[in-house]
Amino acid sequence: MRIVTLIKKDGRVILRSRLLLTTLVVYPIIIVGIIGYAFSEPNTRVPIAVLNKDLENGKPDVDTIKNPLHPEQGGVPVSTDHIIHGVGLIPGLDEFAELHEVRTEEDGRDLLLSGQVQAFIIFPLGFVDRIVNYQESAVIRVIVDQSDVVRANLTEILVRGVVQQLQERYIEQKVGLVLEGIGTALDPPLSSALYPGFRGSRERLENLTQRAEYADVPADHKDNVTLVIEFLREVERVLDDSSGIVESVARPVRARTEGEKSGHLYVRDLIVPAALGLSIFWTGTLATSSLMVYEREAHAYRRLGITPTSRSTVVLSKVAITSAIVFGQTLFILLVVTLHPQWKAHVDNFPLTLLLIILSTFASIGLGIFLGGVSRDVNGTILLAVLVTFPMLFVSGLFYPVSFMPEGAQLLARLFPLTYTVEGLRGSMLRGFLFEDALVPMFALFLFGLGMTVVGTMLSRLSERR
């Protein structure tokens, strides 16, 4: 019964302080809502400037990839317009980007440097000619704004993806024509200028060596004929596998991307676990430390010392009221983002997610007890909680992967419990983690919470004796 009375007392303390109530309950929900709204509708149309120097009479140049042995035959049409606007089922840049056509490089660079576009694409003069011939590769210049590394990488991936699809189409056409030319060189038709071809030439020379009069041919001439026959046989052997040779030269490496994910994921799905972790540690740390210091300032511990109430009961009441606030707040956010039609956040393993929330709450309360033991007044506690929580936002993987950080930063990230909360929740919500997959973050959160609770309790007792 004493603990119930203490919980009611702590609850009245929070309810009486409107600023503390707002900071603990309302503020995290507002922040999560803002983050959710910002990431709920991803903008896929990237502003890009385009300069097309390969023009003919003011219009995009058009040519076809032709058979070098039969240039009179038609082929696949090629144009810069295909890359910009697409062709057939192959999309162009304008399907993914908001294009701004410019007339000079200076205009494009001005748009890029002023932030109006995220990339500047230049089609050089003679671009189409280089694609249709068999002598050199055509080059597209892509200039990106490197002031934002993440945006620059995404923009480059977008441009490369569009170009790659058209390139595959052109490669397929050229490979087919080259294979056709090789086949013609081996076995040309009677009307071909290459007749009799490699195979026919070898067969004629071999037939020549079978004739009786061949015996009268000088020995050095026979040696030359033998060398030519052997050469033609080697050419046949190599060209008989011409398909594999040409394919390996034209496309030495093919990347086949396969994604493993539970459903279609947006950026907002990655933000939800981070927002939950931020809410847990903000509320749990601030609420626990504030309540503990408030009681010390009001000399409540001394008054409770003359009663049968034990020290553990007093601390347990703080843990209970804080846990109730954190659980209520976290479950509210989790249910909203899961059930709301605009969010529809993924939760692959709900029991594991709840367990990680419990352990994260325990870790945040332990951190709050530690800060309460260090601080001397409520204002100092709030400031200290902000100073501790704020760095965790940047090194715990909320906005930037820990694996991309330098080794020193990765070691620092492993000291913060929020890192394990984010990793664990993303695993249980997005990657289908089982309980054994999340043993490391669960164990780390439990140890952190236990250690901070023990040390914080000792520091709090020392502060009371002063």
Image (spheres, rainbow, N blue to C red):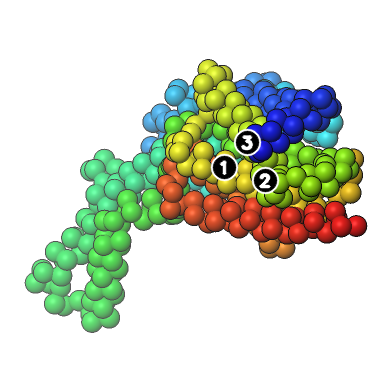
Judging depth in this view, the residue of 3 and 283 nearest the camera is 3
Disc with the residue nearer the chain's start (2 vs 1): 2
- For label 3, the crowd category at 10 Å Cα-Cα, with few meaning under 14, some 14 to 19 and many 20 or more, is few
From the image, tell me which residue sits under label 1.
358
Q: Nearer the viewer, mark 1 or mark 3?
A: 3
- Asked whether the viewer can see residue 87, the reply is yes
Q: Which mark is residue 1?
A: 3
Q: Nearer the viewer, mark 3 or mark 2?
A: 3
In the picture, which quadrant includes the C terminus?
A: bottom right
Q: Is residue 261 above or below residue 102?
A: below
Residue 30 located left or right of residue 87:
right
* Residue 227 image offset from top left, x and y in percent: 28, 73
Choose top left, top right, bottom left or bottom right for residue 261.
top left
Disc with the residue nearer the chain's start (1 vs 3): 3
User: Going by the picture, which residue comes out furthest to the top?
Assistant: 341
Tell me what residue is drawn at x 79 percent, y 47 percent.
306
Judging depth in this view, the residue of 95 and 352 nearest the camera is 352
Disc with the residue nearer the chain's start (3 vs 2): 3
Judging depth in this view, the residue of 272 and 163 nearest the camera is 272
Residue 60 located left or right of residue 201:
right
- Asked whether the viewer can see residue 60, the reply is no
Choose top left, top right, bottom left or bottom right for residue 198.
bottom left
Q: Are marks 3 and 2 in contact (CB under 8 Å)?
A: no
**Mark 2–mark 1 distance (CA, rounded to whole Å):** 20 Å
Q: Give the structural element (helix, strand or loop) at label 2.
A: helix
Mark 3: which amino acid?
Met
From the image, tell me which residue sits under label 2.
313
**Mark 1–mark 3 distance (CA, rounded to whole Å):** 24 Å
Q: Give the structural element (helix, strand or loop) at label 1.
A: helix
Mark 1: which amino acid?
Ile
Mark 2: which amino acid?
Thr
